[in-house]
Image (cartoon, rainbow, N blue to C red):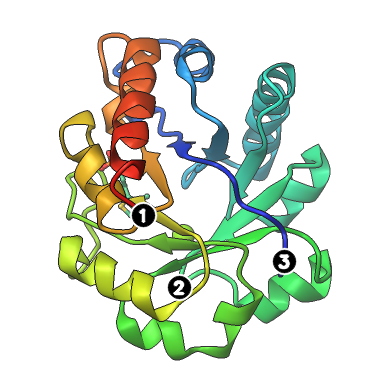
Amino acid sequence: MEVDFPYKLYLVTDEKACLGRDFFWVVEEALKGGVDIVQLREKKLSLDQFIKKAEKLKEICDRYKVPLIINDNIEVAKHVGSYGIHIGQSDMPMDEAREVLGDSYPVGLSVETFGDLKKPNIAKAWYLGVSPVFSTPTKEDTISEWGLKGLAQLKSMTEKKLVAIGNVKTQNATEIIKFGADCLAVISGICSAPSPAKSAEKFRLEIENGLRFR
Ligand code: TZP
Ligand code: MG
């Protein structure tokens, strides 16, 4: 899977994290602030609701020329013509996704342990989600965290672009980039911020800072 991954600030959406504010407003503010890739992650919607939400989000992302990724749902991805999909270790297998989507469709994959790195599906991943880099109240079913050391070690073991996710905040963003993340994926740090736009701007600055050390 040789599709380039130049993205630096990856918004993963979560309605709850928007704290009662309009979901699409939050995403658009984040885009104004410099988010350069967006993932729609929905666990509870019906297929119909998921598709409707994805269609609206796709329109917004298209206006900002930012790729939309769908979490773990091929049907929704195909329906809205999303740029790519993201799957976790316990989601559909990579081969199943590839069978339907073909070899050149961008499929991001989460890795939770060093053991995951040895699995053959890694070669077919567009990027690797380092999940979670730090444990986070947003996702409570994670067992361990990579931490900065684990992230650095992972970096030395793969050529794939690494997207760090889990308690990524403006306060630790520079550090996470220094230790090897190529891109930061954020839910609450942006969706729950008083100004999602300003938060995204700050993340971009911190990422630039971190990259100077690489
Ligand atoms: N996968 C690993 S951690 C996580 C996901 C979806 C949640 C990240 O949320 P936050 O609020 O940015 O810590
Ligand atoms: Mg999943």
Q: State how far apart marks 1 and 3 are (Cα).
A: 19 Å
| Quarter of the rendering containing residue 118 | bottom left
Numbered disc 2: secondary structure: loop
Q: Sort mark 1 into few (<14), some (14-19) or many (20+) by Cα contacts within 10 Å.
A: many
Q: Position of residue 181 (x, y in %)?
A: 36, 54
Which numbered circle lies on residue 90? Answer: 2
Residue identifier under label 3? 2
Q: Residue at x 62, y 44 (%)?
A: 69
The tag earlier along the polypeptide, 1 or 3, is: 3
Residue identifier under label 1? 181
The tag earlier along the polypeptide, 2 or 3, is: 3
Screen quadrant of the N terminus: bottom right
The tag earlier along the polypeptide, 2 or 1, is: 2
In this view, the residue in front, 89 or 133, is: 133
Q: Residue at x 73, y 28 (%)?
A: 55
Numbered disc 1: secondary structure: loop
Q: Position of residue 27 (x, y in %)?
A: 50, 20
Indicate the amino acid at tag 2.
Ser
